[in-house]
Image (cartoon, grey):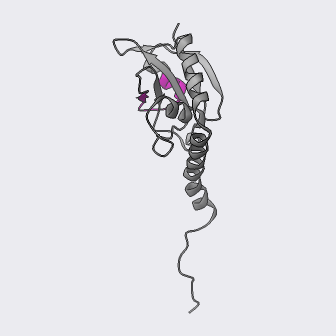
């Protein structure tokens, strides 16, 4: 059985099955599937960079897990958006399911993130959200209009 983790943008995490990259594409509901691999080459983070506007929300849990399993810092870790699938691969590079040991390792690494790193990442995600929100709320500042 190929057990993978499905992390929704809302923060919910599910165990599900995926046997091919096409299965992952269906799970993340995207096009142009891409992946990033952890530093120890144990975990593959699958995501779609071409998301619909409603799925542009940063997936905080997936981004924290990417931070915990790579050499990235909160300042430079890629912000994963929308649904993300975490799987692994076999020696031939083919998609493979996560073992119980790998699931335990993910949990342990997530818990090992420091409060400081979590706080810095949360702030960065908040700042990333602001420019889009501000542009919808207030028009760009310019010179005041003088009546003729």
- Whether residue 108 is visible here, answered yes or no, is yes
Taking depth in this image into account, of 114 and 134 the one nearest to the observer is 114
Above or below residue 65? Residue 54 is below
In which quadrant of the rendered view does residue 147 lie? bottom right
Viewer-closest of 91 and 30: 91
Where residue 3 sits: x, y (%)? 54, 13
Task: Report the residue at 62% width, 66% height from top.
Answer: 138
Q: What are the residue bounds of the magenta stretch?
A: 24-37
Judging depth in this view, the residue of 26 and 143 nearest the camera is: 143
* Magenta-span inclusion, residue 2: no
Q: Quadrant of residue 44?
A: top left
Residue 51 higher or lower than 109, as above or below: below
> Residue 94: image x %, image y %?
38, 14
Q: How many marks?
A: 0
- Residue 86, horizontal then vertical, whole percent: 51, 23
Q: Is residue 4 visible?
A: no
Q: Residue furthest bottom?
A: 148
The verdict on residue 34 being magenta is: yes
Q: Can you say which quadrant of the picture contains the C terminus?
A: bottom right
The residue at the point 45 percent across, 44 percent down is 76
Picture coordinates of residue 27, whole percent (x, y) = 54, 24
Question: Which residue is most to the left?
Answer: 92
27 versus 3 height, above or below: below
């Amino acid at each position: 059985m190929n057990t993978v983790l499905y992390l929704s943008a809302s923060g919910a995490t599910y165990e599900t099955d995926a046997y091919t990259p096409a299965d992952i594409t269906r799970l993340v509901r995207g096009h142009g599937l891409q992946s990033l691999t952890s530093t120890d080459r144990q975990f593959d983070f699958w995501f779609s960079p071409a998301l619909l506007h409603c799925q542009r929300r940063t997936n905080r849990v997936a981004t924290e897990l990417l931070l915990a399993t790579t050499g990235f810092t909160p300042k430079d870790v890629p912000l994963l958006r929308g649904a993300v699938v975490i799987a692994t691969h076999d020696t031939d590079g083919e998609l493979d399911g996560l073992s119980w040991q790998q699931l335990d390792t993910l949990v342990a690494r997530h818990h090992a993130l420091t409060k400081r790193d979590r706080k810095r990442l949360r702030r960065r995600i908040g700042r990333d959200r602001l420019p889009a929100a501000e542009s919808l709320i207030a028009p760009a500042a310019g010179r005041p209009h003088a009546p003729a």
